[in-house]
Each structure stands twice: as structure tokens, then as C-alpha cells.
Amino acid sequence: MGGSILARLVIVSNRVASPKERLAKAGGLAVALREALNRRGGLWFGWSGETEVNPPAEPKVTKAGRITYALLTLDPEEQRAHYAGYANGTLWPLCHYRLGSLSFHRSDWEAYRRVNAAFAKALMPLLKPDDVVWVHDYHFIPLGTELRALGFEGRIGYFHHIPWPTPEVFYCLPSHAALVRDLSHYDLVGLQTEHDVRALLTYISAEAKGWIGPGGVVGMQGRRFRVVAYPIGIDVDAFVRDATASIGGQDRKRLDASLAGRTLAIGVDRLDYSKGLPNKFSAFEDLLERYPEHRSKVTMMQIAPVSRGEVAEYRALRRELEESAGAINGRYAEFDWVPLRYLNKPFPRPTLAAIYRAARLGLVTPLRDGMNLVAKEYVAAQDPENPGVLVLSRFAGAADEMSGALIINPYDVEGMAEAFDLALRMPREERIARWEDNMAKVKARTIHDWCDGFLADLAATGEMLSGESEQRPVPRSVTGH
Ligand code: GDG
């Protein structure tokens, strides 16, 4: 196989940050991928965000600086079945352990495969033999299989941004065997945490009769690939810069004036049922009920931009949260204090950084999350002399690293309220010690380390996979969880 770290990079992701999109508005991941492409020059391939009946089979290709964008338009029904159907109606709930929300239709599964085949067919003519292809996320698991079937022999890596479920949960997916077979066509499969790696390797050894070698090398059904954890990070410098610059700025002035000296607790999550928003609201309500000393003294702000409104579960969640926020405010508000500010619109990154900086509590309470970048952004934005406290769900990948956080179980609403109270009363010395722990971890693994680490390993997989690799039993740490 060809390819080196200097080979051209091709990134495939469902959503592509277009050249026109303002940096402040794009998510941290989109910005990092664009930077990686800008540094080495490369191709960014994905969905155009548009649908049309009988769409062209070729992508629309444009160039901006060192990046070539190739964007494919999809048929509306194919796009629905691929995106709202199989990706977000089946894989998303499955990987977030939400079996009650999982819907599986063979027609969606077939459309998911057809759309992946169409993406591969559109990408293939643009590829050079020694390109390195990096595929992102659960919308594109079969893309590697399809590119191999079309004859591409260069390196292909896949990164899964969401959790990989344990085998008992994964078995609920009727197409489980086919999906793992798809993974085996990549050279390198990246997951967020060691827990996710153990879950996948356990499945591979128990169900797919594969073998596991050192360095995460896997042999399965005649193919070899690697499975490795790459915990994603953030652009730390950018957050520190934006948060520091916000002091004395317009956003901060407006926020301080509106708070009138009250303590702020902040939550920032896409409006998604995996983020544990109803539980967070209930915990805040329980705090006000059982710790009345915080009434009129603490304001909670929840920023929750609407997401995937085309999926019924998400519309139901939105209604539930509107009702819950209304009930909390109706019950506890005073004529000069609204306990919960609930906002459905997104804000530019510098405004987010200003709000994080002003908040004494960062509330990150997902029921399951691959990593959770908000937890790391909140830490990076704090004042080192007077930092806030991160309250973090044990079910976020970030909990493995954030040893200074107050770790909570989001299913335990009363336990969460107790943690909120503890955080509100925490002395400055303890806040500083906990923040220093967290900040050291955030700095140790930035988004750039994540990007470079994955690509360096992908470039090196050739030797690892072709080397002598005897068959070994699965290590003990891999079988238990
Ligand atoms: C998936 C996985 C994994 C949010 N509101 C606004 C805004 N955001 C930004 C945040 C953060 C990003 O969106 C959200 O990232 P998360 O990691 O918290 O969650 P997901 O969107 O579910 O991401 C997750 C991630 O992929 C990366 O691998 O960590 O586990 O689920 O950066 O700041 N940004 C702006 N305005 C907003 O209102 N500008």
C-alpha cells in the first residue's frame, strides 16, 4: 500500500464546513479538519446539504486556497432514509444505549448502503493511488468497503465520534455483523475511549471469531486492521484567547448587567436526548426545592440549539423541555429573578467563551456521550485565579480524563442536585486545585494532537499490518467490562 504522512489527505464527513462559513460559527471539529487540510492541502468530500430528485452522480467541485471541496447532492428520499432513518434513527440511539428509541427498517438499511455506494462511486474518480482517506462518523461506516470494491488500495481510516456500545447492546442491531465487517476494510479504526475499544474488541473476538494482537491489531475474516482510542480534544489556545478577550467586552457587560450579581450555571448542548437535558432541569429544580438558600442567588442558563428537527424523538424532547422550563420558572421565579434561561438559538464561539468564563458552574450531564467537547471548552475558558467547577456525567467519554470534575450519575437527580450545591459552596482553593487537574488534561490532548496522532498512525499502519503477527488470545482486560 502507498501513502505517507505527506500524501494528500482526503477527508470524508457528512457535514462539510464550506469555504464561506465563518470560523466563529463552525464547530471546533470542522475548524480543526479545515486546518489539517489547509496545512497539507487536500480534498474535503461530503454531502452538499441539498437534495434534488434525480441528482447528478458527480459531486460539485470547487477550490478555496489549498482545499478542494467536492459536494454530492442526494435524492430527497434516499437522504431521509440514510440520515434521519438509519444513521439517526438506528445507529445514533443504538450507540447511545437508547434501545427504547431504536427503530430499524430494512428499507433504511438498504438506503444507507446505497447512499454509501453512491458516495464511494462519486469519490473514486477524484482519488489518486497514494491518497490517505480519513472517513468521519457513523453516516459512512460502509464507505471503506465500497471504496475497496471499486479498487482503491491506499490507506483508509475511520473515526467514530460517538460511543461504541458493548456487545449485548450491539447485538440488538439486526445488521451488526455487516457493520463490523465494514470496519475490517479500513486500515485504522479510531474510537473515543479505551472503554469503546474494549467493547468493539470483545465483540470481534466473541462474535466475529477474530484475533487481537499487540497495538490493537485485529485479524478478522482474512483481513487485518487496527482499533485504537484517540480521545478528541479542543483548540485550547483559541478558547483561552476568546475567554480572556471577553473580559470587559460587550457580551460580558450585557451578561453581568442581566445577572445583577447572581451566580451563573451554564449548560451548552445540542437539543439531543443523549445529552440528559430533562434530568439536568429536574436536578436544578430539586436544588431550588431542597436548598432554598440558592433561590434568587443562582441563575441557570441552558443553550440548546435545535438539532435534527426532522426526527420525531427530537421534536418530542423539545416539547418536554419547554414544558419543564416553563414549570420551573412558573414555580420559583420572583418578579426580579428568572431561575432558568432556556435558549434554542446558537451563538458565535466568542460569545460562548464569554458565557463559559462568567459561569461558576459548568453542567455537562449526558446519559451517554462519545467525548463531550463542551466539558473541555468550559475548563479552557476559566479564570485560573478564580475558576468555576465542572459537574460532569460519568457517561461522557471526557469523564475518563477530567479527574478534577465533580462526577455525577445523571439518572440520580437528587445526587446531581447535591453536586450542584457542593459546587456552589466550594472554596476557591479547591476550585483551583480541581481546575488545574482538568486544565492539564485538556492541554495534554488538543484537537491538533488528535488529528496528527490519528494521521501519523494511519500512515504507519502499513508496516504494522503486514508485520509478523501471531494469533494471540484476547487479553484479559479486553474480555471483561
Ligand atoms: C459529537 C459527539 C464528541 C454547541 N452550541 C453552540 C456551539 N456548540 C458547539 C460546542 C462544541 C460542539 O458544538 C458540540 O460538541 P460535543 O462534543 O459537546 O457534542 P456533539 O455535537 O454531540 O458531538 C461528541 C464530538 O462529536 C466530537 O468528536 O465529543 O461526544 O456526540 O464544540 O461548543 N458552538 C457555537 N454556538 C453554539 O450555540 N458556536
Image (tube, rainbow, N blue to C red):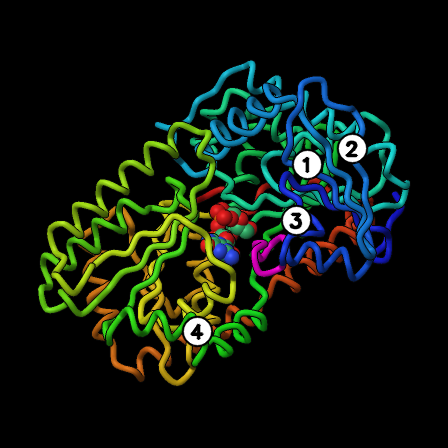
Disc 2 packing (10 Å; few <14; some 14–19; many ≥20): many
Q: From where the camera sits, is residue 371 visible?
A: no
User: Which residue is tagged 2?
Assistant: 59
Instruction: Using residue 28 as the reference point, say whether residue 225 is left or right of it.
Output: right
First in residue order: circle 2 vs circle 1: 1
User: Which SS type dominates the magenta stretch?
Assistant: loop
Depth check: give the residue in front, 120 or 63: 63
Separation of marks 4 and 1 at Cα, in angstroms: 35 Å
Measured from the top left, where is residue 67 in percent x and y? 80, 52
Secondary structure under tag 1 reads strand
Quick check: is 25 in the magenta stretch?
Answer: yes
x 42%, y 58%: residue:
399
- Contact between marks 2 and 3 (CB within 8 A): the answer is no
Residue 168 to residue 351: above or below: above
Secondary structure under tag 2 reads loop
To which quarter of the image does residue 137 belong? Answer: top right
Quick check: is 422 in the magenta stretch?
Answer: no
Disc 1 packing (10 Å; few <14; some 14–19; many ≥20): some
To which quarter of the image does residue 97 belong? Answer: top left
- At label 2, the amino acid type is Pro
User: Which residue is tagged 1?
Assistant: 48
Measured from the top left, where is residue 345 in percent x and y? 42, 50
Extent of the magenta region? 23-30
